[in-house]
Image: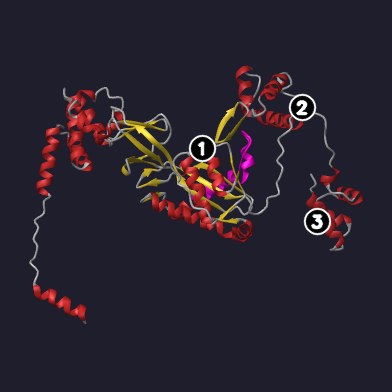
């Protein structure tokens, strides 16, 4: 089969090298007659190829095509592979594996000829007008903190014109995270865009009827404080927030590449991981500075103060179980507050508890809803008096602070009739001393196969205290040394 390149070479041999047709055709690797045909036509082989409209072999899917078409009409997203597997099951022996490619071509052509696709309309983006934000999950990157998997989200902010971006580590798609990340970005810019677009985030919008959503009052208050016009996508149209949606993949890819260069995905603290992320953002923003300057030139300067990024519950009752309910989650508090009310401020990653005008505790915020977090230290003084309550306690699983405690309890269940009482007493010792010390003692017992009991743990704690008391010797100071210091200071 003669190619375009052969004909082009033949022409060069004739026009530039001065060869006759026969020699030029031979040098190009074709017959003289073939070369004469293309010279006479002044066309390349691809230009002389006639399109074929007839079928050269029998249509293997002729009998089932009506059924396939019915599937595609109802579910245009169906893949040819899914349909082919269906045919193999429904019509055993009728089709062969090698016919999959034929069906893929048929399905592709059907979709091109039968279904209109959604058209994307490129927009004219003006500097300083629109900002966008959304969350993206970072768990696929395998980040760990001191070896422990670090599950988290990234709040992602971007300016649509320059693509300048910023971010914030967070743990849920909550309004507090949105407020903090958004305000951090504005204060980084020291400027305010005209518009801020999100998709239909539950942190920013609420359902008003079956046909749509509207912005929540606190989100509108946040936008009003900075004089920004809020906007949102139509439901199901994520591409309308396209800049930040596209940047999700790019920022995660950039972080992934930077982690490969770093040689480790483990960090010694969340703070060091955050410093690493800020450096990634900085490098990505460097080539955008010229366009960013265009944006800053037309954006309003930031002159208003930052708003607090917490949600306040002014009156939360503490139940007789020493529990409070905040945001559909249950938390334990110190039993001394039973019967009282606490003021609770919910931040992106923790709860701040107030009694009167003072902060009395900070609790790590639960990720998600309908969950619970019970700290054994809050209830152990009552539980040690009623150890029988432990066996069927609703939040029993929260009372195993580490795996070692859980394993110790399982051992007690297998070897002691007083397992619940013994475990509660061990937990009481952990509350009265250092939890890690009790944990290490339990680990030693488990490794050695020794009998576990609260008395044995208490004895080991006592021995460690006696062994660990250092002998303190304080040298009596000489007054002459003080005089020398005073003289040096005077000089």
Q: Is residue 320 above or below residue 223?
A: above
State the residue in front, 433 or 301.
301
Find disc 2 in the rendering and name its residue: 57
Identify the disc placed on residue 439: none
Q: Quadrant of the N terminus?
A: top right
Disc 3, SS: helix
Name the spot of residue 424 as percent of width and height, x first.
Answer: 20, 30
Would residue 323 be visible to someone looking at this image? Answer: yes
The quadrant holding residue 352 is top left
Find disc 3 in the rendering and name its residue: 9
Between the C-alphas of marks 1 and 2, the distance is: 59 Å
- From the image, give the main secondary structure of the stretch colored magenta: helix
Between the C-alphas of marks 3 and 1, the distance is: 66 Å
Label 3, residues with CA under 10 Å away: few <14, some 14-19, many ≥20: some
The nearer-to-camera label among 3 and 1 is 1
Q: Earlier in the sequence, mark 1 or mark 2?
A: 2
Q: Is residue 195 above or below residue 451?
A: below
Name the spot of residue 117 as percent of width and height, x first.
Answer: 72, 34
Find disc 1 in the rendering and name its residue: 203
Label 1, residues with CA under 10 Å away: few <14, some 14-19, many ≥20: some
Q: Residue at x 30, y 29 (%)?
A: 397
Q: Is residue 433 shown left or right of residue 399?
A: left
Q: Earlier in the sequence, mark 2 or mark 3?
A: 3
């Amino acid at each position: 089969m003669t190619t375009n390149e052969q004909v082009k070479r033949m022409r060069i041999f004739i026009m530039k090298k001065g060869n006759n047709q026969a020699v030029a055709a031979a040098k190009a690797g074709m017959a003289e007659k073939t070369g004469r045909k293309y010279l006479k036509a002044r066309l390349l082989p691809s230009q002389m190829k006639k399109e074929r409209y007839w079928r050269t072999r029998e249509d293997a899917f002729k009998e089932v095509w009506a059924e396939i078409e019915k599937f595609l009409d109802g579910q245009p997203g169906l893949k040819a592979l899914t349909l082919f597997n269906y045919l193999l099951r429904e019509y055993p022996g009728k089709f062969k594996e090698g016919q999959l490619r034929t069906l893929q071509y048929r399905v592709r052509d059907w979709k091109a000829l039968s279904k209109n696709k959604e058209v994307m309309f490129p927009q004219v983006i003006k500097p300083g007008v629109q900002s966008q934000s959304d969350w993206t999950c970072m768990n696929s990157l395998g980040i760990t903190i001191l070896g422990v998997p670090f599950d988290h989200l990234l709040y992602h902010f971007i300016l649509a014109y320059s693509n300048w971006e910023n971010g914030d580590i967070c743990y849920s798609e909550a309004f507090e995270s949105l407020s903090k990340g958004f305000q951090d970005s504005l204060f980084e810019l020291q400027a305010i865009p005209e518009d801020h677009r999100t998709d239909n985030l539950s942190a920013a919008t609420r359902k008003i009827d079956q046909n749509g959503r509207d912005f929540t009052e606190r989100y509108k208050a946040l936008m009003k404080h900075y004089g920004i016009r809020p906007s949102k996508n139509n439901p199901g149209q994520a591409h309308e927030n396209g800049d930040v949606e596209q940047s999700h993949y790019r920022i995660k890819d950039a972080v992934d590449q930077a982690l490969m260069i770093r040689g480790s995905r483990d960090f010694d603290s969340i703070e060091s991981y955050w410093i690493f992320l800020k450096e990634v953002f900085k490098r990505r923003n460097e080539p955008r500075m010229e366009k960013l300057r265009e944006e800053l030139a037309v954006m309003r300067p930031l002159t208003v103060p930052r708003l607090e990024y917490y949600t306040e519950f002014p009156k939360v009752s503490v139940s007789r179980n020493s529990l409070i309910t905040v945001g559909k989650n249950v938390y334990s508090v110190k039993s001394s507050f039973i019967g009282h009310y606490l003021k609770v401020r919910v931040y992106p990653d923790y709860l701040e508890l107030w009694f009167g005008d003072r902060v009395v505790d900070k609790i790590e915020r639960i990720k998600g809803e309908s969950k619970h977090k019970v700290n054994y230290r809050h209830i152990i003084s009552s539980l040690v008096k009623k150890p029988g309550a432990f066996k069927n306690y609703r939040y029993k699983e929260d009372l195993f602070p580490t795996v070692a405690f859980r394993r110790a309890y399982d051992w007690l269940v297998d070897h002691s009739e007083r397992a619940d009482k013994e475990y509660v007493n061990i937990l009481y010792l952990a509350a009265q001393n250092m939890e890690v010390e009790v944990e290490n003692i339990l680990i030693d017992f488990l490794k050695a196969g020794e009998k576990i009991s609260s008395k044995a743990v208490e004895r080991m704690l006592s021995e460690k205290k006696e062994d660990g008391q250092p002998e303190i010797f304080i040298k009596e100071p000489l007054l002459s040394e003080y005089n020398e210091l005073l003289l040096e200071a005077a000089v």
